[in-house]
Image (cartoon, rainbow, N blue to C red):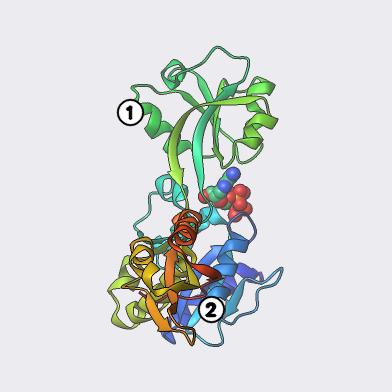
Amino acid sequence: MIAPSATNQSIRGLATLAESGRLRLAIQKSGRLTDPTLSLLKNIGLDFESYGQRLISHCDNFPLSILYSRDDDIPGLVGRGTVDLGVVGRNLLYEEDQPVEEILPLGFGQCSLVVAVLRESHYTDPRELIASRIATSYPVSVRRYFADLGGEPEIVRLKGSVEVAPALGSADAIADLSATGSSLILNDLRPISTILKSEAVLIANPAALADRERREHIDRLLLRIRAVQAARRYKYVMMNAPVDALPAIRRVLPGLKAPTIIPLDHEGFVAVHAAIREDIFWESVERLKEAGATEILVSSLEKLLL
Ligand code: ATP
Ligand code: ZN
C-alpha cells in the first residue's frame, strides 16, 4: 500500500475542519508574501504556531486553521472550496482564472508585471514585440495583454530565472514582476511597459461567503484587519496650546470628528488630542507649531475601529 503524502493527509483534514465550523485560510508557505501575511495575522491577535515545515496551524483563540502552500495553488484551493480564504498577489488572480472573490486589498506585496528588454536593444514600445519571443512565468496575463495590442508573440514559459532569458538569447523580451526595478537593472534590462499592478489581497470562496456561519467569522476577521489598517493610516497627537490658538489649531486638526480639548491647570492653556492622517503628518505638525502649539507628543495607534 502506498502511504498518503503529508499534503494529501492535511487536505483531507481540511474537510473535517470545515465540518467543525472552522474557517480555512491558505497562505504562501515560503516566499515574499509569507512574512507580511504572518505579521498581519499576529497583529490582529490570532494565536498560532508557525514554524518551518508546518503544513497546517490551528488558531487557539479563533475558529481558523491556516494551510501553507505554493502561492500558485492558492487561487485554485479557494476556487474549488478546499479552503474558504486565501492571501495571494492579485497578479495570480489574472493568471489563474478561478471563481474567487477579492474581499480586501492588504496593502503589502506591491509590484508590477512589466515588459522589459535588454538595455542595449532598440525596442521602445511593446507593439514592436507583438511577433517576438517573450519569456515569462505569467503566460495568461502576457498573452491577453499582447492580444489587446493586436499581436500574438511566442510565449517562452519559464518557472524561474526569467530575467536571464534575453541575455541567453532564448527570448527577445521578458514579462516579469518587479517591485523596485533593481533586479531588472542588475540583469541589464530596461522596462518598456506595465501589464498590470498588483498587491496582496484576501480572497474568498463564494460559497463560504454565502454560508451564514462562515460569513460571520469572515466578517469578524475583516473587522480586525480593517482596524489594523486604519490604525496605520493615523498617528495620535497630543499638544499644549494657548486657548486663543484653538481656532487655528482646529483648522489643521479636524480629528476623526473633532479634536478633544482638555483644560489645563495653567491659566489660558489647554491640551489638545487628535488623530492625524499619516500621509499629511509632517505638514500638519509644522502648521500646528506655527499656530502656537507646544510640547507636541506623537504616538502610533495599534488598532482603530472607525
Ligand atoms: P512559490 O514558491 O510560493 O510559488 P513564487 O516564487 O512564485 O513562490 P514569490 O517570488 O515569493 O513567488 O512572490 C509571491 C508574490 O509576491 C508574487 O505573486 C507577487 O504578488 C508578490 N511580489 C511582490 N514583489 C515582488 C517582486 N519584486 N517580484 C516578484 N513578486 C513580487
Ligand atoms: Zn509561485
Residue 150 position within the rendered picture, expressed as x and y whole percent measured from the top left: 33, 22
Q: CA distance from mark 1 to mark 2?
A: 43 Å
Give the residue displayed 37% in from the left and 74% down from the top: 259
Q: Nearer the viewer, residue 284 or 210?
A: 284
Q: What label does residue 25 carry, if any?
A: none
Quarter of the image with the N terminus is bottom right
Question: Would residue 35 be seen by someone viewing this image from the given angle?
Answer: yes
Check disc 1 and give the amino acid type.
Asp
Judged left or right of residue 226, residue 66 is right
Check disc 2 and give the amino acid type.
Gly
Q: Say whether disc 1 or disc 2 marks the residue closer to the N-terminus.
A: 2
**As drawn, 181 above or below 60:** above
Q: Nearer the viewer, mark 1 or mark 2?
A: 1
Mark 1: give few (<14), some (14-19) or many (20+) Cα within 10 Å.
few
Q: Give the total of numbered labels.
A: 2
Judged left or right of residue 256, residue 293 is right
Q: Which residue is mark 2?
A: 13
Q: Residue pushed farthest top?
A: 122
Locate residue 153: give its quadrant: top left
Give the residue displayed 33% in from the left and 83% down from the top: 213
Q: Nearer the viewer, residue 176 or 258?
A: 258
Mark 2: give few (<14), some (14-19) or many (20+) Cα within 10 Å.
few
Give the residue displayed 64% in from the left and 70% down from the top: 6
Residue 127 position within the rendered picture, expressed as x and y whole percent measured from the top left: 41, 19
Q: Which residue is mark 1?
A: 148
